[in-house]
């Protein structure tokens, strides 16, 4: 059974950092394209970062240079290091597993989703 469990969210002031974790079970993280997404009330779910099976990474323009996606194969865990946080980074953050082979931040190919972890950045 595929399961994804996010953690690490919280409240932080602008300029601060958080590191999100996503523990996967029922499959091997390194064998799939994995992604991080975020959503705020009334808005579409937005792709933040993705990592391919080869380790190739891609980011949304709004977070490039501030966020880093990575994985620990031994722990079967996906991470999102978020630095220089801004109030506009506030939202519920989800990790997801893609059914496609290309690392993309489009939500279309992602079929399995975690429950999310809340990130709140205050000015």
Image: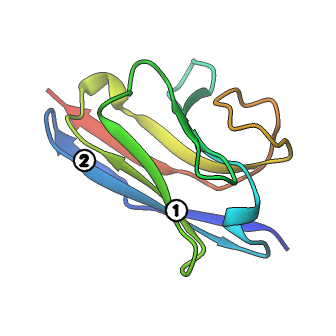
Query: Looking at this view, is 91 or 85 the one in front?
Result: 85
Quadrant for residue 73, please give it. bottom right
Residue 51 position within the rendered picture, expressed as x and y whole percent measured from the top left:
60, 46
Q: Which residue is mark 2?
A: 11
Q: How is the image coloured?
A: rainbow
**Position of 81 relative to 49 (above/below):** below
Name the residue located 39 percent from the left edge and 19 percent from the top edge.
62
The image quadrant where one finds the N terminus is: bottom right
Q: What secondary structure is marked by label 1?
A: strand
- Tell me how far mark 2 sits from mark 1, CA to CA: 23 Å
Q: Is residue 37 visible?
A: no
Query: Looking at this view, is 25 or 117 the one in front?
Result: 25
Mark 2 vs 1, N-terminal side: 2
Name the residue located 73 percent from the left edge and 71 percent from the top edge.
28
Q: Dots 2 and 1: beta carbons under 8 Å?
A: no
Q: Is residue 30 visible?
A: yes
Residue 92 position within the rendered picture, expressed as x and y whole percent measured from the top left:
49, 40
Residue 58 position within the rendered picture, expressed as x and y whole percent measured from the top left:
54, 33
Circle 1 packing at 10 Å, graded few (<14), some (14-19), many (20+), is some
Q: What secondary structure is marked by label 2?
A: strand
Q: Which residue is mark 1?
A: 71
């Amino acid at each position: 059974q595929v399961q994804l469990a996010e953690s690490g969210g919280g409240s932080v002031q602008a300029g601060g950092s958080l590191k999100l974790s996503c523990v996967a079970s029922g499959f091997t993280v390194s064998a799939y394209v994995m992604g991080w997404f975020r959503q705020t009330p009334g808005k579409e779910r937005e792709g933040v970062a993705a990592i391919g099976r080869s380790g190739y990474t891609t980011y949304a323009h709004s977070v490039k240079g501030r966020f880093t996606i990575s994985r620990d194969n031994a722990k079967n865990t996906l991470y999102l290091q978020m630095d220089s946080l801004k109030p506009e980074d506030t939202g519920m953050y989800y990790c997801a597993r893609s059914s496609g082979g290309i690392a993309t931040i489009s939500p279309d190919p992602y079929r399995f989703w975690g429950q999310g972890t809340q990130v709140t950045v205050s000015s």
